[in-house]
Amino acid sequence: MIEFYVNNEAVTFDGVENTPLLWVLRDHLKLTGTKFGCGIGSCGACTVHIDGRARKTCTTKVSLVAGKKVTTIEGLALPGGKLHPVQQAWVEEDVPQCGYCQGGQIMAAVDLLEQIPSPSDADIAREMRNICRCGTYVRIRKAIHRASALISERR
Amino acid sequence: MGGVMRREIDRGRRRFLVGGLTATGSFLLGVPALELLAQTRSAEAGGKIGFFVEIRPDNRVIIGVAQPEIGQGVRTSMPMLVAEELDVEWSSVSIEQMPLGIVKTADGFTWKYGGQGAGGSTSVTDNWEFLREVGATARQMLIAAAAQQWDVPPASCHTEAGVVVCDARGSRINYSELAPAAAKLPVPEEKPAFKDPASYRIIGKPTRVVDAKEIVTGKASFGIDTDVAGMRYAVILRCPYLDGEVESFDDQVARRVPGVLDVFRIDGPKPGEPYLILASGLAVVAESTWAALQGRKALQVKWSKGPHASESSTAFWQQCDKLLATTGQIVRDDGAFDQALGQSNDVVTARYEIPFVNHAPMEPQNCFVHVEKEKARVIAPTQSPSGANRAVAAVTGLPRENIYVEMTRVGGGFGRRLTNDYVAEAAMISQKIGGPVKLQWSREDDVQHDFYRPSGMHEMKAGLDAAGRITCWTQRLASAGKYYRRPNVEPEEQYAAELYVDDFPAQIIDNLRIEWFEVQSGMPRGSWRAPAHTANAFVIQSFLDEVAHASRQDPLQLRLKLYGENRELPYGQHGGPVFNPWRLSRLLKHVAERIDYGKAREKGRGVGIASHFTFGGYGAHAVEVTVDDSGKLVIERIVAAVDCGVVVNPLGVEAQLEGGTIDGLSTALNLEITVIDGKVAQSNFNNYRIARMAQMPAVLETHVLPYGDKPTGMGEMGLPSLAPALTNAIFNASGVRIRKLPIKDQIEKEI
């Protein structure tokens, strides 16, 4: 039995311990905002935060998050449903096309902005490694700059 | 995508328009006839709305979308057409996805809600008249209801965003209050008058993706998110050899994996037969996705390698080379090509190679199917819901009218989900286990089993006179075409998906010959965003540059001269009936100006341009690059322009132009599928390297140049001209001519 926290709620998993966190979130906890894209930790569609840092769940065994705090895209908005500034910026810049990768992109961007509050384009190019097959990268870049401004306004 | 998608469009859709009242007092307008709806609605899976417009008592307006949303923005653009003519505030509109609607008639099946599918960039074009008419008809009925209530002539009333107004009487009334009365009125026989475009409040206004909030909060539901009580999870281990089979297998270990419930054989098509599914293999059914994947990993299989075991990419190119030394199928032959070539002053010739590529939508293929004795339920991320219906009918033998298909949001299409092989597989598994199942593909499954974009070698030749005028032109293509194993396509029609014979420069260069050679290959092929336009735009727009340089002409001026004045040429393929090359000139001049085309640049910096007509829309790119002494390429700036006629949603058009440009860039830089020993060599994103943020240009400008009074589609037009503009820029910067895609490390090697 593995115990951990997802979006501030205690959860348990009593299945096979080497199950990737991705499939525990999706199939067992029914949190389907975290997406399966590659299964090898390459595309980033499955990105969540583990103890506050962006991590790929398709290659993270659930046993490794025992006792840890996991935040998924469903848990990112503020209490009461107010969008996180990064989510807000994504809407305002009209980023999504198919939308499949965007949850992972947003989780990666939130971590980036926590590490580098005012990233340059070069910082974004280096840190944002998630794949978007629709090619929304230019809007993602704009949205990260906008989110950076929104966060400093809210402070 | 491609012109062969079967169109079951009922051209007389208006006769199906019907008004009605729901139990809760909402006004409904839509198709089909109410009696028909009453018969079918309860049986329709999910109970989703089958109507286009519903006005609720609380003033909310629900607009149904019949098309699948694959990221092209139809859930935003289609309702905009209805809402504009209905005359409501966009903020009062909610969107509902409609299921597949087909109706059995004496003449076969017809659409209930009009054509449903995402392919060939046709949603806006096909629905421009119809959906505005739906909105305008509902508005007309609401006006009629108000006029009756006030006892005034309808002509004395008009509407203002959800309100009917009679100035003479000084009265106003909300649509929602009129809904019960309007619903009882007969649908007017006559087509309603449309708004004056000058008064548009929704069409032409930048409108954000309607589902953005659901997407950014993780609530948007894709096929992969389907969760139905009692559902099992399945994966398939498919034979990696093209047309290979399961010779023998041992599933003892797999069956001991916790959660694994069953393992059984899935039979694929025989070599040469049409594809219902792509490959033979073994299905693993389990209690969770991970258990199914672990069970699959534990399988031991001996494959029979099938008829293509020796196929390789090397042999493919050798075959092309041999074929091009012979005479092929002449598919267009204008003027006297041979004679003109003999008389020309100069001859320019070059060969270009286009690889197979994988669609790689971000959401791997998946499908939920529940086959029962009399009916089946399908929940699928698909571009062709009627194809999904047919696939399940083919597997189960159930009548098509008893197969209910619900469409989810789709995590990318790119043409991959025009074929419903994964739906058929899920139906086979559901039928075998006698219950509901969700089939999941892995990324490896998706990269190694696809209907790949066709690969081919193009030989180009042009003859010029003493003045540098092109007097003759030929394109000779040896390719493995996408109509391979397609039912009902004659051998002599196979070329038609590879070469669109009315494409530029046909009808402009007098002596012109187009020739096709069929390459033998076991690779499954299909439609990939802008199908053959991706190859032909690269080849034709690269070769034009080569001709310009060989004859000391400016590449832009040469194009402008050829495109000529504003006129329409007949165009017989998808996107016709006409093609106006002048519209390409207009775009080219625009992008050339934006990129400072004529400016002298330092060594190692260059610009390239290209333009192409795709399925009715016009696109152009200008690219600025630097190439350093080691051959390192940096894309400094891309200027993209499109003319898709009337613009319905500027934000959506720009998104498709950006996305198409980046898709073109990503594919030109890195993407190819190769074959070794009868198997696909690539397997996942570590060796099929889709471009990421680091490869993005510092600047990507998009320009939308409206034209005329009708829209064209926008899903594919933004892609084809990017690759040749890029490689033309590379030549301008470095002198290295890229004739083989993808570019990969060719510049480094040449320098």
Image (tube, coloured by chain):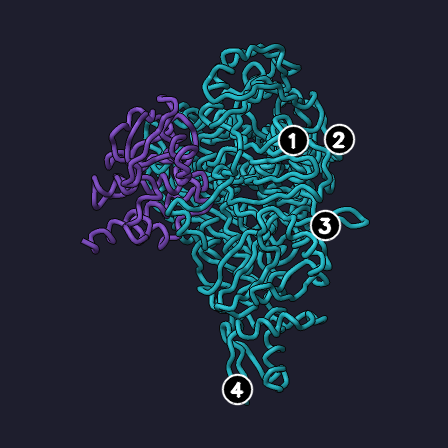
Chain colours: A purple, B cyan
Give, as a three-letter code, the residue at label 3.
Answer: Val
Task: Kindly identify which chain the residue marked by label 4 belongs to.
Answer: B
Q: CA distance from mark 4 to mark 3?
A: 44 Å
Query: Nearest the camera: A7 or B357?
Result: A7
Name which of mark 4 and mark 1 comes first in the sequence: 4
Badge 3: few (under 14), some or many (20 or more) residues near its Cα, within 10 Å? some
**Disc nearest the viewer among 4 and 1:** 4
Residue in the picture at 47% in, 31% down: B737
Looking at numbered disc 1 in the image, what kind of residue is underneath it?
Gly
Q: Read off the residue under disc 2.
A: B491
Q: Give the crowd class for mark 4: few <14, some 14-19, many >=20 residues within 10 Å.
A: few
A75 to the left or right of B104: left
Q: Is residue B108 above or below residue B155?
A: above
Please give the chain letter of the residue carrying mark 3.
B
Query: Between disc 1 and disc 3, whose residue precedes?
Result: 3
Kindly indicate the quadrant of the structure image that contains residue B266. top right
Q: Secondary structure at mark 3?
A: strand
For the residues labelled 2 and 1, the Cα–Cα distance comes to 11 Å
Q: Which mark is residue B103?
A: 3
Give whichever of B485, A86 is nearer the camera: A86
Cβ atoms at labels 3 and 2 below 8 Å apart? no
On the image, the x and y values in percent for residue B130 come to 64, 61
Q: Do the residues under discs 4 and 2 have CB atoms within 8 angstroms?
A: no
Q: CA distance from mark 4 to mark 2?
A: 67 Å
